[in-house]
Image (cartoon, rainbow, N blue to C red):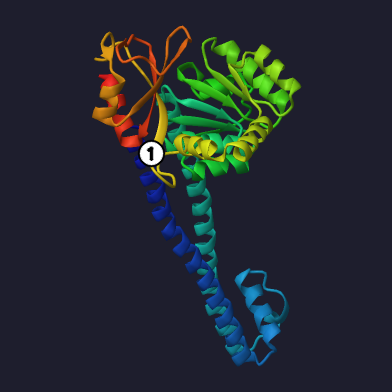
């Protein structure tokens, strides 16, 4: 369902691009008509009056603009007759050019308003989506990772240029301050399943976290921290988890130096679907109330033989993590299975747990 929504949005964008083509032809036609009018007028005055090329062009411009000053007052009879023809055609061409420009302005404004309304309707219909605040280098990467997995999201960004990037990526985006309650409500925070605050300023991340936590007490909030002393402030503000890009990068570089094969395997398993190499993923699959697996006995060997999936651990509703569970482990409602395998087989297992 999510994939089909993204496909439909791309189709709408392609249709819009096709609709812009006649507008481009119209603009080219206006430019060609004005250029042809100036050329014919200059050449005509050159023939009838014998003036210099500049004087002929100047006289043509005076005629077309209806100013009527300068050499027009010195025209011969043939020149005046030709001037009447240029004036009539000039009025027509300029009228067409002005009407085309006005139409372009009106259509552009209509398209913008229509696009905003369509985006607002899409946002109002979103449920169990993610909210990404800030589209800097970190925020863009977060948004792309979520979008590539076909999960609905909404981005919030103050800068119009960065918001334009999200629109080109077919990501719904709100231009505004993510620390505003109004903007967060527009992003559908009441029905969101998580929020990432990834703006550059630590102070702004604190404000965003405080505002979001005031609206939703149960919302998972992941916040970015640039400075070490900001981590404790973000946790006190209500962040569920605080991530420091610099600390993470340092840890990753150290692991690449010490255990490169382990780090390469982790990168492969945590990469986005459709990347380079085997389509290997580590995912978490929650056992819902109506799932057939709820209350049944889980056999890791059966998962491996039937789906080609490895059961790594089980996260229980109370937060306890059971690593490498035993073969006769009973599955309870709310358990989160942490499994590893290729994407198609993981989707099969996810469909089974949702049944």
Q: Quadrant of residue 121?
A: top left
Location of the N terminus (image quadrant): top left
**Where 126 falls versus 335 (above or below)?**
below
Residue 295, percent from left and from top: 27, 8
Please state which of residues 246 and 236 is positioned toward the viewer in this rendering: 246
Q: Is residue 284 left or right of residue 242?
A: left
**Where 21 falls versus 189 (above or below)?**
below
On the image, numbered disc 1 is attached to which residue?
6
Residue 227 visible, this orientation: yes
Residue 150 visible, this orientation: no
Residue 287, percent from left and from top: 34, 15
Location of the C terminus (image quadrant): top left
Task: Check disc 1 and report its element: helix, strand or loop.
Answer: helix
Please state which of residues 312 and 293 is positioned toward the viewer in this rendering: 312
Q: Quadrant of residue 23?
A: bottom left
Residue 317, percent from left and from top: 43, 9
Residue at image coords 24%, 15%: 292
**Where 328 falls versus 15 (above or below)?**
above
Residue 265, percent from left and from top: 48, 37
Q: Is residue 129 left or right of residue 251?
A: left
**Where 201 falls versus 317 (above or below)?**
below
Please state which of residues 138 and 177 is positioned toward the viewer in this rendering: 138
Residue at image coords 53%, 57%: 101
């Amino acid at each position: 369902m999510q994939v089909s929504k993204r496909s439909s949005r791309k189709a709408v964008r392609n249709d819009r691009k096709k609709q812009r083509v006649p507008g481009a032809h119209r603009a080219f036609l206006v430019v060609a008509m004005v250029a042809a009018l100036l050329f014919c007028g200059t050449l005509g005055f050159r023939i009838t009056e014998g003036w210099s090329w500049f004087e002929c062009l100047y006289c043509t411009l005076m005629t077309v603009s209806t100013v009527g000053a300068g050499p027009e007052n010195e025209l011969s009879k043939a020149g005046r007759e030709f001037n009447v023809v240029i004036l009539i055609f000039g009025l027509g061409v300029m009228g067409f050019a002005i009407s085309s420009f006005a139409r372009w302005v009106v259509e552009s404004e209509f398209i913008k308003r229509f696009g905003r309304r369509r985006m607002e309707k899409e946002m109002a219909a979103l449920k169990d989506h993610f909210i990404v605040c800030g589209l800097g280098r970190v925020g863009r990467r977060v948004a792309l990772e979520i979008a590539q997995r076909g999960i609905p999201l909404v981005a919030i960004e103050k800068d119009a240029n960065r918001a334009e990037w999200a629109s080109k990526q077919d990501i719904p985006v709100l231009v505004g301050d993510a620390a505003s309650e109004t903007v967060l409500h527009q992003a559908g925070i009441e029905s969101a399943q998580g929020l990432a605050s990834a703006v550059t300023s630590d102070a702004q991340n604190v404000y965003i976290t405080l505002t979001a936590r005031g609206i939703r007490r149960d919302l998972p909030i992941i916040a970015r921290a640039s400075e070490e002393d900001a981590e404790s402030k973000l946790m006190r503000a209500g962040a569920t988890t605080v991530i420091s890009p610099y600390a993470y990068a340092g840890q990753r570089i150290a692991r690449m130096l010490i255990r490169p094969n382990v780090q390469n395997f982790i990168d492969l398993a945590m990469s986005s679907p459709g990347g380079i190499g085997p389509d290997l993923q580590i995912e978490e699959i929650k056992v819902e109330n109506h799932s057939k697996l709820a209350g049944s006995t889980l056999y890791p060997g059966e998962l491996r033989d039937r789906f080609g999936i490895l059961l790594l651990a089980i996260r229980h509703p109370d937060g306890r993590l059971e690593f490498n569970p035993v073969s006769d482990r009973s599955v309870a409602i709310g358990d989160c299975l942490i499994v590893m395998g290729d994407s198609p087989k993981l989707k099969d297992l996810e469909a089974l747990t949702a049944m």
